[in-house]
Amino acid sequence: MKGLVYRGPRDIAYESVADPAIEDDGDVIVQVRACSICGSDLHIYNGDTFSDQPGYCVGHEAVGEVVEIGRGVRQRRIGERVMLPAAVGCGGCASCLAGNVLRCERDLQQCYGLSNALQGSQADAVRVPAGDFNAYPIPEGITDDQALMLTDAAATAWYGCELARVAPGGTVAILGLGPIGLMAVEDAFLLGASRVFAIDPLPERRAIAAAMGAVPLDPADAADLIREATKGRMIDHVLEASGSTEALLLGLQLVARERTMAAIGVNLSPSVPIPFGQLFMHGATLAIGTCSVPRYYPALVPLIRDGRLRPERFITDRMALADGAAAYAAFDRRAGGTLKTVLTP
Ligand SMILES: [Zn+2]
Ligand SMILES: [Zn+2]
């Protein structure tokens, strides 16, 4: 089969790779119908990787069809339409069954496409471990595009709002208006935010947030304008969704006393100069983390199905998987207002 393979920094190539095969009785093989590029894939693209061994398929957001099942698979069926949550667990322990794969009691949590340990899904097909759990049937009323957003971005945005403890009446600031940041703007309003400040250096991204009802701000003067707008009280719930250290440090300037900032953008810096004394004196909370995707399906599936959340509207580009190298380059340049790129094998 063919897939997008990480060869080295800024070198992702569409090439022949080994067909995925059942390695464990619980595995299923899914033929990919559509996959998407995530902001976190750009870290790999730019050489900021989780693995020093290149040569693996990238990608962790995909929907498709079950084409092969291991002998131990009980619930998945050949031909079933499934979505593949980016975060994978053993699927059998209490934590996984509660959707919290990051706390998998068998320590089998992982993500597609970060190393050779679990090949990515920007490919014709992908092996899904513990397929009964990790290949999730696409719920009735959910389109493929919506399901694709549910594999990571929509869940991560919701998780970010939860981590920032977004609550009715609170003020919210979101740094980084990629698809996840923009989805978080929508989530924050749905969760009752009184005002949402949307911060990004790109004016076209700020304009999208403004159209959703947020107050658009350039990072250069965001702190001053927010100080003025909140009469110095600053922000109850800050969400950093870009992964940039500058944005993280700006966010820490924005968080109000005894309130919370959540950092969900991928930032692999070994150290960040956090103003510890200020956080201490203010009693602020800094919450950091990555999302256990399936945990949010009970909330998100109905909200998306019934049109209260529309994460699919951030799909801006559609290309063939075979043009994946060009898609990555364009995505990296954020060319032409690219937000979410969907690739089709
Ligand atoms: Zn992703
Ligand atoms: Zn588990």
Image (spheres, helix red, strand yellow):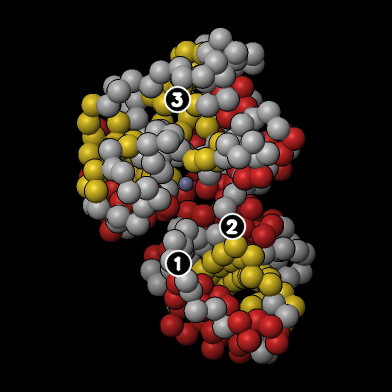
> Ligand 2 falls in which quarter?
top right
Nearest-to-viewer mark from 1 and 3: 1
Instruction: State which tag comes first along the sequence, 1 or 3.
Output: 3
Crowdedness of circle 1 by 10 Å Cα count: few (<14), some, many (20+)? few
Quadrant (top left, top right, bottom left, bottom right) of the N terminus = top left
Is 101 left, or right, of 331 in this rendering? right
Answer whether labels 1 and 3 touch (C-beta < 8 Å). Answer: no
Mark 3 lies on residue: 127
Q: Under 8 Å from ligand 1: the CB of mark 1?
A: no
Q: Which mark is residue 180?
A: none
Nearest-to-viewer mark from 1 and 2: 1
As drawn, 329 above or below 163: above
Q: Quadrant of residue 294?
A: top right
Q: Quadrant of residue 33?
A: top left
Mark 2 lies on residue: 289
Image coords of residue 152 (percent x, y): 53, 44
Q: Residue at x 44, y 61 (%)?
A: 268
Is 54 left, or right, of 118 in this rendering? left
Quadrant (top left, top right, bottom left, bottom right) of the C terminus = top left
Of helix, strand and loop, which one carries label 1?
A: loop
Crowdedness of circle 2 by 10 Å Cα count: few (<14), some, many (20+)? some
For the residue marked with disc 2, what is the amino acid? Gly
Mark 1 lies on residue: 270
Image coords of residue 219 (percent x, y): 46, 78
As drawn, 167 above or below 106: below
How far, Cα to Cα, is label 1 from label 3? Answer: 32 Å
Image coords of residue 173 (percent x, y): 59, 71
How far, Cα to Cα, is label 1 from label 2? Answer: 15 Å
Q: Residue at x 23, y 26 (%)?
A: 16
